[in-house]
Protein backbone atom coordinates (compact mmCIF):
# COMPACT_ATOMS: atom_id res chain seq x y z
CA UNK A 1 0.00 0.00 0.00
CA UNK A 2 1.18 3.50 -0.80
CA UNK A 3 2.26 5.42 2.26
CA UNK A 4 1.43 9.04 2.92
CA UNK A 5 5.12 9.98 2.43
CA UNK A 6 5.28 8.19 -0.93
CA UNK A 7 2.12 9.94 -2.04
CA UNK A 8 3.56 13.28 -0.98
CA UNK A 9 6.74 12.61 -2.99
CA UNK A 10 4.73 11.59 -6.03
CA UNK A 11 2.59 14.72 -5.79
CA UNK A 12 5.69 16.90 -5.62
CA UNK A 13 7.17 15.16 -8.67
CA UNK A 14 3.93 15.65 -10.60
CA UNK A 15 3.76 19.29 -9.57
CA UNK A 16 7.27 19.95 -10.78
CA UNK A 17 6.63 18.06 -14.05
CA UNK A 18 3.46 20.09 -14.77
CA UNK A 19 5.23 23.31 -13.88
CA UNK A 20 8.08 22.51 -16.32
CA UNK A 21 5.57 21.79 -19.11
CA UNK A 22 3.70 25.05 -18.39
CA UNK A 23 6.93 27.10 -18.41
CA UNK A 24 7.95 25.57 -21.73
CA UNK A 25 4.52 26.24 -23.26
CA UNK A 26 4.59 29.82 -21.98
CA UNK A 27 8.06 30.40 -23.46
CA UNK A 28 6.90 29.04 -26.81
CA UNK A 29 3.76 31.17 -26.77
CA UNK A 30 5.81 34.25 -25.89
CA UNK A 31 8.02 33.74 -28.93
CA UNK A 32 4.98 33.56 -31.19
CA UNK A 33 3.40 36.84 -30.04
CA UNK A 34 4.68 39.94 -31.79
CA UNK A 35 5.62 42.83 -29.51
CA UNK A 36 7.28 46.23 -29.68
CA UNK A 37 6.40 49.84 -30.27
CA UNK A 38 4.73 49.13 -33.62
CA UNK A 39 2.27 46.77 -31.95
CA UNK A 40 -0.69 47.51 -29.70
CA UNK A 41 -2.93 45.24 -27.65
CA UNK A 42 -6.51 44.67 -28.73
CA UNK A 43 -9.33 43.17 -26.61
CA UNK A 44 -11.90 40.90 -28.23
CA UNK A 45 -14.80 42.02 -26.08
CA UNK A 46 -16.94 38.92 -26.52
CA UNK A 47 -14.19 36.73 -25.07
CA UNK A 48 -13.40 39.03 -22.12
CA UNK A 49 -14.85 37.82 -18.81
CA UNK A 50 -13.77 40.90 -16.84
CA UNK A 51 -11.39 39.00 -14.61
CA UNK A 52 -9.17 42.07 -13.93
CA UNK A 53 -5.92 40.25 -14.58
CA UNK A 54 -4.72 42.32 -17.52
CA UNK A 55 -4.93 45.73 -15.79
CA UNK A 56 -3.10 44.16 -12.86
CA UNK A 57 -0.08 43.15 -14.96
CA UNK A 58 0.02 46.21 -17.22
CA UNK A 59 2.86 48.40 -15.90
CA UNK A 60 1.87 51.24 -18.21
CA UNK A 61 -1.71 51.66 -16.96
CA UNK A 62 -2.87 51.13 -20.51
CA UNK A 63 -5.92 49.02 -19.67
CA UNK A 64 -9.15 50.21 -18.12
CA UNK A 65 -12.22 48.24 -17.12
CA UNK A 66 -15.66 49.48 -18.06
CA UNK A 67 -19.22 48.39 -17.47
CA UNK A 68 -20.91 46.75 -20.42
CA UNK A 69 -24.68 46.37 -20.42
CA UNK A 70 -25.91 42.87 -21.17
CA UNK A 71 -27.85 42.56 -24.42
CA UNK A 72 -30.90 40.85 -22.86
CA UNK A 73 -33.57 43.31 -21.67
CA UNK A 74 -34.57 40.79 -18.96
CA UNK A 75 -31.28 40.50 -17.09
CA UNK A 76 -29.20 43.23 -15.56
CA UNK A 77 -25.79 42.16 -14.29
CA UNK A 78 -24.06 45.11 -12.64
CA UNK A 79 -20.72 43.29 -12.50
CA UNK A 80 -20.53 42.67 -16.24
CA UNK A 81 -17.22 44.34 -17.05
CA UNK A 82 -14.86 44.36 -19.99
CA UNK A 83 -11.29 45.46 -20.53
CA UNK A 84 -10.38 48.29 -22.90
CA UNK A 85 -6.91 49.24 -24.14
CA UNK A 86 -5.77 52.85 -23.95
CA UNK A 87 -3.87 52.71 -27.21
CA UNK A 88 -1.62 55.74 -26.67
CA UNK A 89 -0.30 54.33 -23.38
CA UNK A 90 0.27 50.78 -24.63
CA UNK A 91 3.96 50.01 -25.16
CA UNK A 92 3.31 46.69 -26.88
CA UNK A 93 4.92 44.58 -24.16
CA UNK A 94 2.35 41.73 -24.61
CA UNK A 95 2.16 40.88 -20.88
CA UNK A 96 -1.62 41.19 -20.98
CA UNK A 97 -1.82 38.65 -23.80
CA UNK A 98 0.07 36.13 -21.71
CA UNK A 99 -2.00 36.59 -18.60
CA UNK A 100 -5.48 36.55 -20.16
CA UNK A 101 -7.20 33.26 -19.24
CA UNK A 102 -9.61 33.38 -22.18
CA UNK A 103 -7.21 34.48 -24.95
CA UNK A 104 -9.27 37.64 -25.35
CA UNK A 105 -6.27 39.87 -26.16
CA UNK A 106 -4.25 39.96 -29.36
CA UNK A 107 -1.40 42.13 -30.51
CA UNK A 108 -2.19 44.08 -33.68
CA UNK A 109 -0.18 46.52 -35.79
CA UNK A 110 -0.61 50.18 -34.82
S1 LIG B 1 0.74 45.15 -24.31
FE1 LIG B 1 1.70 45.72 -22.36
S2 LIG B 1 1.47 47.97 -22.27
FE2 LIG B 1 0.02 47.22 -23.82
S3 LIG B 1 -1.89 46.95 -22.72
FE3 LIG B 1 -0.82 44.96 -22.71
S4 LIG B 1 0.34 44.92 -20.78
FE4 LIG B 1 -0.27 47.07 -21.17
S1 LIG C 1 -7.35 39.25 -18.68
FE1 LIG C 1 -8.66 38.81 -20.47
S2 LIG C 1 -10.62 38.14 -19.60
FE2 LIG C 1 -9.48 39.16 -17.96
S3 LIG C 1 -10.19 41.31 -18.02
FE3 LIG C 1 -8.34 41.17 -19.31
S4 LIG C 1 -9.11 40.79 -21.38
FE4 LIG C 1 -10.78 40.35 -19.98
Image: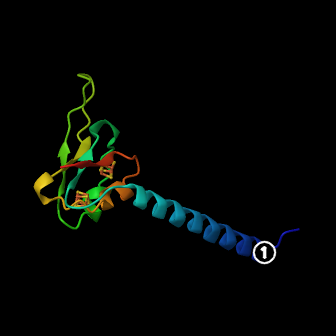
Q: Is residue 88 left or right of residue 24?
A: left
The residue at 29%/59% (across/down) is: 35
Q: Residue 26: x and y, percent?
A: 47, 61
Q: Nearer the viewer, residue 58 or 29?
A: 29
Q: Residues within 10 Å of mark 1 (few under 14, many from 20)?
A: few
Q: Residue 98: x and y, percent?
A: 38, 58
Is 53 above or below relative to 10? above
Q: Is residue 49 left or right of residue 90?
A: right
Q: Most extreme residue toward the top, as rendered?
A: 73
Q: Nearer the viewer, residue 73 or 16?
A: 16
According to the image, what is the colour scheme of the structure? rainbow
Task: Report the residue marked by disc 1.
Answer: 6
Total numbered circles: 1
Q: Residue 52: x and y, percent?
A: 29, 55
Q: Most extreme residue toward the left, as rendered?
A: 88
Q: Nearer the viewer, residue 44 or 71?
A: 44
Q: Quadrant of residue 76?
A: top left
Residue 106 visible somewhere in the drawing: yes
The residue at 58%/68% (across/down) is: 20
Which quarter of the rendering shows the N terminus?
Answer: bottom right
Q: Quadrant of residue 93?
A: bottom left
Is 103 above or below relative to 33? above
Disc 1 Cβ-to-ligand 2 distance below 8 Å: no
Q: Is residue 95 left or right of residue 25?
A: left
Instruction: Tell me the element at label 1.
Output: helix
Q: Is residue 18 left or right of residue 32?
A: right
Q: Residue 86: x and y, percent?
A: 14, 53
Residue 79 visible somewhere in the drawing: no
Ligand 1 rendered quadrant: bottom left
Amino acid sequence: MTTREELQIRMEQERSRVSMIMDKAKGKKLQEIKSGENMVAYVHEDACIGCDQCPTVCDDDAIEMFHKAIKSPLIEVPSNRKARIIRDDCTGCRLCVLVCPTDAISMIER
